[in-house]
Image (cartoon, rainbow, N blue to C red):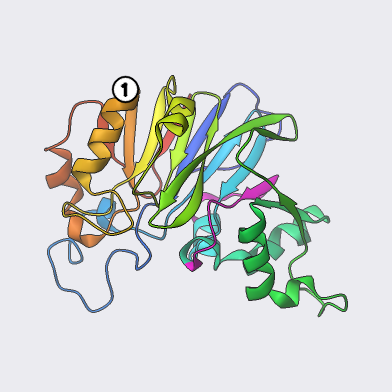
Amino acid sequence: MSFFNPVNLVILLKITFLGTGTSTGVPFIGCNCSVCTSLDFRDKRLRTSIHLEVEGRSFVVDTSPDFRQQMLRERITHLTAVLFTHQHKDHTAGLDDIRAFNFIQQHDIPIYGTLPVLDQIKREFAYIFTEEKYPGVPSVQPCVIENKPFEIDTIRFTPIEVMHLKLPVLGFRVHDFTYITDANFIADEELEKVKGSKVVVLNALQKTSHVSHFSLDEALAVLEKIKPEQAYLTHLSHRMGTHAAVSAELPPYVKIAYDGLQIRL
């Protein structure tokens, strides 16, 4: 289980995959394919998100529609801040449940995103940002970031701008770890920011081509340019295949991520 321990500073960085599925999750509602009916727990995928425990701080990247379930499953009881990759609902819809951390910590939770991302969150969660708030609604502090390094409570994050069809999306590098989701194009200058990472997480939706996500072969080609020590694939759909079958096809340094998987650096 992943939990925040403010007195344990031995682990420099611990990554927990909160969800590794695409916007529909896996199983897909009403589908009887071999992936959706699989009994392997690694084929049960909530919407994509990760938790980072960095030098005693606790960060979540994206609040998926499954945010509450993910927090409970991993027993996360403290949150330093939330970072948003982009404004699509499968990455923001769970924001309301951040109020549990308000109750526990008794202060606003900082949320970091580009101006377009925060503007859309303010529209979709308007009740959070009104002057006369209903009692008990979430309390957040919006913090605008751009495509340049920034710090949260002394922890340095380097954004990696990728394209999700025509929508700019931010990946994030912290220490020797880089996380990129919802991409189908990464410019060479952005890839340079990733190089040297020991662990890279990259989206790979399915085996066939897609208009706004990397396919499996496209993701592998990007990873070959970066050459990390270890890579994990996330944001998978049921069309990718079962965890066991796809894992057998991958290069030794590439693995399929699954919900609850933890990495320590």
Tell me what residue is drawn at x 65 percent, y 24 percent.
Answer: 9
The image quadrant of residue 134 is: bottom right
Q: Is residue 163 left or right of residue 256?
A: right
**Foreground residue among 201 and 143:** 143
Q: Is residue 46 left or right of residue 85?
A: left
Tell me what residue is drawn at x 17 percent, y 53 percent.
Answer: 242
Locate residue 132, reporting x and y percent. 87, 79
Locate residue 42, reporting x and y percent. 27, 51
Locate residue 21, reporting x and y percent. 35, 57
Q: Is residue 110 above or below residue 233?
A: below
Residue 141 in view of the camera: yes
Q: Is residue 195 above or below residue 165?
A: above
Q: Main secondary structure of the magenta part?
A: loop
Q: Is residue 70 magenta?
A: no
Locate residue 92, reporting x and y percent. 55, 63
- Per the rendered image, the range of residues in magenta is 73-89
Q: Is residue 55 left or right of residue 188?
A: right
Q: Is residue 234 above or below residue 117?
A: above
Q: Amino acid at mark 1?
A: Lys
The image quadrant of residue 233 is: top left
**Foreground residue among 15 and 208:** 208
**Foreground residue among 2 and 131:** 131
Tell me what residue is drawn at x 62 percent, y 65 percent.
Answer: 95
Tell me what residue is drawn at x 41 percent, y 37 percent.
Answer: 187
Structural crowding at the residue carrying mark 1, measured as other residues with C-alpha within 10 Å and reported as few (<14), some (14–19) or many (≥20): some
- Secondary structure at numbered mark 1: loop
Q: Is residue 83 magenta?
A: yes
Residue annotated with mark 1: 227
